Amino acid sequence: MLKATINTEIFKETVDVIVAIVTECRLNVSEAGFMARAVDTANVAMISIELSSGAFSKYSATETVVGIDVNKMKNIVGMMGKEDAISLDLAEGGYKMELAFGGYKYSLALLDVNTVRKDPNMPTIQLPGKVVISGSELNDAIKAASLVSDKIAFGINPEKGTFYMEADGDTDHINLEISGSDLKSFVPAEARSLFSLDYLKDMGRVMSRAEEVEIQIGVDHPVKFAFSIADGNGKVEYLLAPRIEAD
């Protein structure tokens, strides 16, 4: 059972965060709020998101798991106005979720949870390097790299005390190097990994709204991005596998 009301901008942001990685997921509903964890079909990117009941103006729920078509949800929320509030209503054992906003009322069919991939376990990876950067600066670097290449390297030079992002194309090169003293937080360690921009461009658009994004990296290891949404009432982690290229 679920009866809740939430600001549309917060709800849109939540949907955008998920759809950047997957088109469907299991949504775990409890008295504490929402939780979803999913991996994309290629097993390259993972998302973990928690949205506490504090993000809602009204919230009442009992523990349940439902299957959500996130793409369909995104199309619906795209019609919402900024000043709208959206009401969510899920009856006990129901197969549809009712969404109401601005005079509209949608009845959204839920997916059979048995057909949706199970929640993955979060890998226990030790990533020694850590930086905290603004989401807009991170997204700008991702956009700049996409002009010259289809991949980007994140790295830390502990000797120079810098964090860098660079991309190499067939003829062009771009590099952004930031001193640790200019970062919001900096834990230097030997680190450099290469990542696909196909994934990062979608993730970057979402992270551009975050005031702070924590990036954890290692050598040829996945990268972890952690940031807050919903005025601090939501926590998001993205995990992206590296591209390993032959010499």
Image: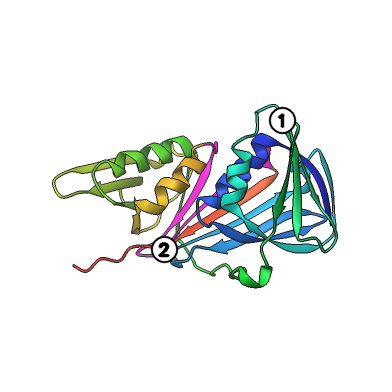
- Disc 1 crowd, CA 10 A, few/some/many (<14, 14-19, 20+): some
Determine the secondary structure under disc 1.
loop
Q: Nearer the viewer, residue 21 or 167?
A: 21
Q: Are marks 2 and 1 in contact (CB under 8 Å)?
A: no
Region of the chain picked out in magenta, as a range: 209-232
In this view of the protein, can residue 157 be seen by the observer?
no
Question: 117 or 200, which lies in front?
Answer: 117
Taking the image as drawn, is residue 85 in sight?
yes
Please tell me which residue is depicted at 40% across the width and 61% down the height of the picture: 218
How far apart are labels 2 and 1 at the CA level? Answer: 38 Å
User: Tag 2: Cα neighbours inside 10 Å, few (<14), some, or many (≥20)?
Assistant: some
What amino acid type is highlighted by mark number 1? Answer: Asp
Which residue corresponds to the image point at 59% horizontal and 70% vertical from the top-left?
Answer: 117
The quadrant in which the C terminus is found is bottom left
Q: Which residue is mark 1?
A: 84
Tell me: 199 left or right of 78.
Answer: left
Q: On residue 45, which mark appears?
A: none
| Quadrant position of the N terminus in the picture | bottom right
Depicted 154 relative to depicted 37: above or below: above
* Residue shown at 71% from the left, 30% from the top: 84
- Place of residue 53 in the rendered image (x, y in percent of width and height, measured from the top left): 78, 47
Q: Which residue is mark 2?
A: 241
Dot 2 falls on a residue whose secondary structure is loop
Q: Is residue 9 left or right of residue 168?
A: right
Left or right: 193 with respect to 40?
left
Q: Residue at x 69, y 56 (%)?
A: 109
Q: Is residue 222 magenta?
A: yes
